[in-house]
Amino acid sequence: MINFDTLLEKVGAIGFCQILVCLLLSYDNIVGGFNSLITVFIAYEPDYRCRAPPLDNATVYPNLTESDILNLTTPYDKTSGTYDYCRKYGYNYTNCDGTLSCVNKSANQIQCDKGYWYDRSMFTETVVTQYNLVCQRSFLAPFSTSMFYVGMLIGSVLFGNVADRYGRKPTFIISAIFELCSMVGCTFSTSVEMYTVFRTLVAGFHYGTTIATFVYIMEIVGSKYRTLFGIIYQIAFTLGFMIVGGLAYNWRNWHKTMFMVTILSTPLVAIAVLIPESPRWLFAMEKDKKGMEVTKRMARLNKVILTDEDWDEAGEKKLLPGESAIKYSVLDLFKNRGIRFTTFNVMFNWFVNSFVYYGISLNAGSLAGDIFVNNTLNGVFELASYVALLLVMNRLGRRLLLSVMLVISGLGLLASVVVNEYAGDNHTLVTLGVVFAFIAKFGISGSFAIIYIYTTELYPTVVRSNGLGTGSVASRIGGITAPYVISLQTLYRWLPNVIFGVFALVAGALSLTFQETNGKPMMETIEQAEVFYKTGIVVDLNQILDKNSIRNDGDFRSETEGCDNLGFQQQKNVYPEINTVAQNLGSSSEC
């Protein structure tokens, strides 16, 4: 098996090829931004009430305002200070002939027997207004949103394994084609059931493209530049949902907004076809001939010539007797203590990041102010978070910064709760509460970007997509849960943000138990990873097996040349050496 890290040093850790591929693959996350947060607009719930003809007919009652109609037709609860928009007074409306003598507020209250009136001043049609997802059908709105994240969960489980077994490129192509077809189906949906099914499919197939593209980017750049390229990928997501805000502002009918989003997503299929397979994956799977072809193409684009000496230096790695290209699965993430503990911690961190991120983002419509302005400000704060990460992430490392960002988000949410509870009609305090909410968005956006990058670095090549997929499974559970937690604000306005804030603080504390990966080469094998989880050092397994690098004082070099792609059947032979080295390093490790 050829060592791709050695070749990467020759080809260039960053060059024209990596920049071009990164920009092309990042378009996938623009599409992700389109689809993930488009429901803020297309599933917007406007003000509504029961239809009450002819009282709400402007021809018969031209002088009645909407406030007048609401007062004449809709029961008012003096205790809570709110109208019951799902009921109306049950007097005989057919007697209303231009006068108000027909009005009888003492009449029995009845459900909306004539349908609903919606305020269409912002959107002419949304999923909520077209399918009447209010009152008895109101549960279908958060259900359809949650099903989107169920789709992501399914995609995480399915495509993480597919990408590791069959390659990044086939996963990208298949997922992109079916994602686009599902978006077409969603655009022309004629029922809430049809809409929900296609949204679920969009999410599932999109996560196939996400796993393939993000892992690919992390595999072809040097460790020094993983932060830069990872953040660029996340910036694309932010640009996606900011663009959707502009589309929704221009096209106020949800079908037209979805149609424009679908049109803008079509280049994704062409990109999937044009991009070659990841050379790191090809070498890890011992497809050396194809891997060499792709690597030579990278070198040409970077204007570098690979010599025979370069290939000899990359060399054929030593393999244990009987070792061959082994197929790995998600089960390999739980077979050994180190990777198992890391996986559970990664899953919880992904769950919290998604839970809090979508809890804040999907609730943007409830913030004081204009929905389009708030969406833009959400994007601005995300971009500011990414800029901050670019400036400090390589200096502070992944672990500390992940923890800090989660704590900022948690404290921001709890502060917004306190301020909002005492704000009342005080405009200054209302604005301050919104500011704290945006600070929380700043923190959670940063931590979400970090955990993407961090996860790809915490796992070796042979299970990297599985690791990212497993984290994503937990993330989607967070996304599924978030809409229902948001709905708790109808009972206690402060409760959702308290829940989100507490989870963020707990995840921030647990983040400190990860090993630091900043500036370290990517691991290739599970055995290599097990040593890293114990010591925080990326070791050369060939040197361990040869016992040539173990010095008398128990120290040895941290390199990656010649990392073996070992399977679990070799663990009994290998792990005694690994454990010895790990124990020797344990006393001197800084991690």
Image (cartoon, grey):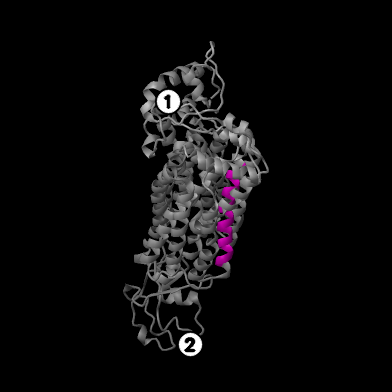
Residue sitting nearer the eye, 259 or 99: 259
* Magenta residues, start to end: 228-248
Q: What element carries label 1?
A: loop
Q: Residues within 10 Å of mark 2 (few under 14, many from 20)?
A: few
Give the answer, above or below, for where 227 lies relative to 319.
Answer: below
Q: Identify which residue is drawn at 39% across, 46% down.
A: 157
Compared to residue 55, the image places residue 365 above or below, namely above
Q: Looking at the magenta stretch, what is its main secondary structure?
A: helix
Residue furthest to the top: 552
Residue shown at the point (57%, 44%) measured from the top left: 230
How far across and how far down the image is residue 321, in percent?
40, 25
Q: SS of the residue at dot 2?
A: loop
Disc 1 target residue: 320
Quadrant of the rendered image containing residue 490: bottom left
Q: Where is residue 224 in the image (x, y as percent from the top left)?
A: 62, 36
Which label sits on residue 435? none
Q: Name the residue under label 2.
A: 59
Q: What residue type is labelled 1?
A: Leu
Label 1: few (<14), some (14–19) or many (≥20) C-alpha neighbours in 10 Å: some
Q: Which amino acid does label 2 sit on?
A: Thr
Measuring from the top left, give residue 344's x and y in whole percent. 41, 36
Query: Percent x, y for residue 152?
Result: 42, 52
Residue for point 46% across, 87% down: 60
User: What residue is drawn where x is 45% and y is 77%?
Assistant: 69
